[in-house]
Amino acid sequence: MKILVAIKRVVDYNVRVRVKSDGSGVETDGVKMSINPFDEIALEEALRIREKGQADEVIAVSIGGDEVQQQLRTALAMGADRAIQVSAASVVQPLTAARVFRALVDKEEPGIFFLGKQAIDDDCNQTGQMLAALWDRPQATFASRVEIEGSKATIAREVDAGLETLEIDLPAVMTSDLRLNEPRFVKLPDIMKAKRKPLDVIAIDDLGIEDAVDLETVAWEPPPKRGGGIKVDSVPELVTELKNRGLL
């Protein structure tokens, strides 16, 4: 069984995000970029499934220019068997990404397509669900525990009321939550080995996918600065202040 894992290049979660002075986007020059944390968790889980003997190959996939090869090499250093870069001139939107992944499903025929539940740059939380709909296969989102047995998977997922357990047939789409696992640390020998692993480049046009722009971002601006707090002497005064601010 193959497992495809989608990874996205994002600003590292430890970096303070700054908006460009002209409001055209987020500043990325000289900024540390990393694998989206949720995607890294998805990759770690795929590697653990393979190490249990329940999968034969783990393939990391990313969409973008040549800069995404840095994150794909990191995925290879973590233990992925090979990587695929779908070359695109611009950052694709969730529906286009889902269509790209659907085309790769036809090419690779995986048993599981793993994604992070969302990316920390746009927080869309859409691609996995869209891929499942396009593929017409079961989906298990926000997975906090995954168990594979034969052609079925049991997934515990986090919902508002607690944990929900699903049993789904494979092939399927899964998206990882934060508590699914803790990704492994990449060692220097693994980084050196990753340079010899295959990394294929496929143009998005060769997959028959149109890089459509369905949503237009008009402007970017930082959140307003937080104002100072106030102290109140009693509960009635607190309630009055909350009502004056339209919070009650």
Image (cartoon, helix red, strand yellow):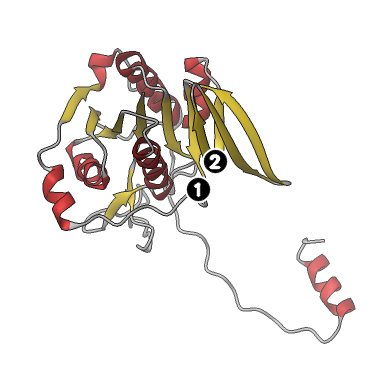
Residue 229 in view in this figure: yes
Residue 7 located left or right of residue 236: left
Crowd band around label 2 with a 10 angstrom C-alpha radius: few (<14), some (14–19), many (20+)? many
Instruction: For mark 2, give the secondary structure.
Output: strand
Q: Position of residue 248 (x, y in %)?
A: 82, 61
Crowd band around label 1 with a 10 angstrom C-alpha radius: few (<14), some (14–19), many (20+)? many
Q: Position of residue 214 (x, y in %)?
A: 44, 25
Residue 143 image label: 2
Residue 187 located left or right of residue 106: left
Q: Earlier in the sequence, mark 1 or mark 2?
A: 2
Q: Position of residue 73 (x, y in %)?
A: 20, 43
Q: Residue at x 26, y 58 (%)?
A: 31
Query: Which amino acid is tagged 1?
Result: Leu
Instruction: For mark 1, give the secondary structure.
Output: loop
In which quadrant of the rendered view does residue 106 lie? top left
Residue sitting nearer the eye, 158 or 225 = 158
Residue sitting nearer the eye, 123 or 54 = 54
Is residue 166 shown above or below 121? above
**Residue that carries the numbered disc 1 in the rendered image:** 180
Query: Which amino acid is tagged 2?
Result: Ala
Q: Residue at x 14, y 36 (%)?
A: 197
Q: Residue at x 52, y 18 (%)?
A: 137
Q: Quadrant of the N terminus?
A: top left
Is residue 191 shown above or below 154? below
